[in-house]
Image (cartoon, grey):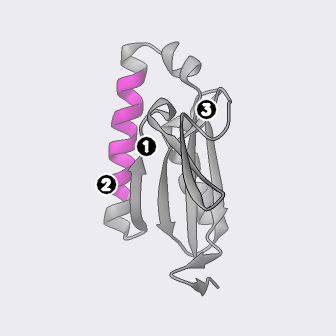
């Protein structure tokens, strides 16, 4: 079963961390990625740039309209994700709980099962 484990970032929370705490988060993600690669459960992981570098694309009167900034105004944003292939939801939740962000109040780690992949309904 495939699950998306998404990381939701609050910049104010990150800014309040010490350099040592920030380094520990990075180191924890490094160890987590290596363990998932070794177990064969990691399909892909990506970190995303700050939303200030995003654009929103919509089509009006048949023409694309591009505006700067994130789609929604909020203090939290999607910072990255892990796509994993695991036995069941319990394992996905177990993995999500090992992500360093999960231990920091104000940061979020969400687990959602993949419904479609490559046009095929997931089991």
Residue at image mark 3:
107
Q: Could you tell whether 114 is left or right of 50 in the image? A: right
Give the SS element for disc 3: loop
Give the SS element for disc 1: loop
Range drawn in magenta: 22-35
Residue at the (58%, 37%) spot, across then down: 70
State yes or no: discs 3 and 2 in contact (Cβ < 8 Å): no
Please state the horizontal and vertical placement of residue 63, each as a whole percent of the image: 57, 57
Residue 113 within the magenta-colored segment of the rendering: no
Q: Quadrant of the C terminus?
A: bottom right
Mark earlier in primary sequence (1, 2):
2
Q: Could you tell whether 13 is left or right of 24 in the image? A: right
Please state the horizontal and vertical placement of residue 10, each as a whole percent of the image: 59, 27
Residue at image mark 1:
48
How far is mark 1 from mark 2, CA to CA? 19 Å
What is the number of the mark on residue 34?
2
Give the SS element for disc 2: helix
Residue at the (68%, 31%) spot, across then down: 73
Please state the horizontal and vertical placement of residue 45, each as a whole percent of the image: 40, 55
């Amino acid at each position: 079963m495939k699950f998306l484990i998404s990381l939701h970032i609050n910049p104010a929370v990150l800014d309040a961390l010490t350099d040592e705490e920030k380094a520990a988060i990075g180191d924890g993600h490094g160890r987590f990625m290596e363990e998932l690669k070794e177990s064969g459960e990691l399909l892909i992981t990506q970190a995303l740039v700050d939303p200030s570098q995003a654009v929103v694309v919509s089509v009006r009167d048949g023409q694309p309209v591009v505006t700067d900034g994130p789609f929604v105004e909020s203090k939290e944003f999607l910072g990255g994700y892990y796509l994993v292939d695991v036995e069941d939801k319990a394992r996905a939740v177990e993995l999500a709980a090992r992500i360093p962000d999960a231990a920091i109040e104000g940061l979020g780690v969400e687990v959602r099962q993949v419904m479609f992949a490559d046009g095929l309904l997931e089991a």
